[in-house]
Image (spheres, rainbow, N blue to C red):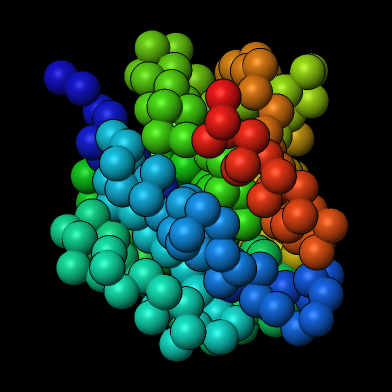
Amino acid sequence: MSNLNSIAALILAAGSSSRMAHGYHKLLLPLGGQPVLTHVVEAALQSQASPVITVLGHQSSQVVAALNSYTNHNKLNIQENPDYQAGMSTSLRTGILALAQYPACTGALIMLGDQPFVSTQLIDKLLATKEQTGKRIIAPCYHGKRGNPVLFDASLFAELLTVSGDEGGRSVIKHHQDEVENIELSDALAQHDVDTWEAYQTALTAWQDQQTT
């Protein structure tokens, strides 16, 4: 029996876009005719991951409005993190705690809301690798460097809840190096995050290039 449908996607989308110029919210910037965040949410919803927990914070009402066409999707669960300004770990905690609603959940793929080139195929590859190897942590590598998203087994949730500050699961990975299965991937574009105005311009160019190739 497959466990794929019981692995959640946990999208961290609460940050204040402090590095983005001109006061823009990076997750709401348009890319290919829709906001950056919707590319991430759509990829997760079309994947084998379920549920898709999306944690919001900064300008949450505007972000909810941007996700309006997905809010009735039976896999999507939107959570609000009132403490988002205390760092990424608070959003991770909000998402992990929300998974208590899903007792059949055997793991969570931690995704970042500002990485719009992460594909459904990549998500499903990580989930399939978890099923094939049984390793507690599955991580993609790009040219030898570990990246995101990272899949954590549910047995690590308690440890993820102890992370503090502006960090995701990096310290947990460090503590369990021998339990990590790394997958080498060729497309480093999946790692591109829209953190700055320059990075957003790069994303626009990359998107145009994708449409013409």
Residue sitting at x 61%, y 42%: 208
Q: Is residue 175 left or right of residue 181?
A: right
Identity of the residue furthest to the front in this view:
212
Residue 182 in the image, given as x and y percentages of width and height: 63, 18
> If the image is split into quadrants, where does the C terminus sit?
top right
| Residue 24 vertical placement versus 118 (above, below) | below
Q: Nearer the viewer, residue 115 or 170?
A: 115
Residue sitting at x 46%, y 52%: 39
Residue sitting at x 72%, y 73%: 17
Residue sitting at x 22%, y 44%: 104
| Residue 36 vertical placement versus 1 (above, below) | below
Q: Is any part of residue 207 visible from this angle?
A: yes
**Residue 186, quarter of picture:** top right
**Residue 161, quarter of picture:** bottom right
**Residue 29, quarter of picture:** bottom right
| Residue 139 vertical placement versus 65 (above, below) | above
> If the image is split into quadrants, where does the N terminus sit?
top left
Q: Is residue 203 left or right of residue 22?
A: left
Residue 189 in the image, given as x and y percentages of width and height: 67, 33
Q: How many marks do you count on the picture?
A: 0
Q: Is any part of residue 94 visible from this angle?
A: no
Q: Is residue 128 left or right of residue 14?
A: left
Residue 10 in the image, given as x and y percentages of width and height: 45, 53
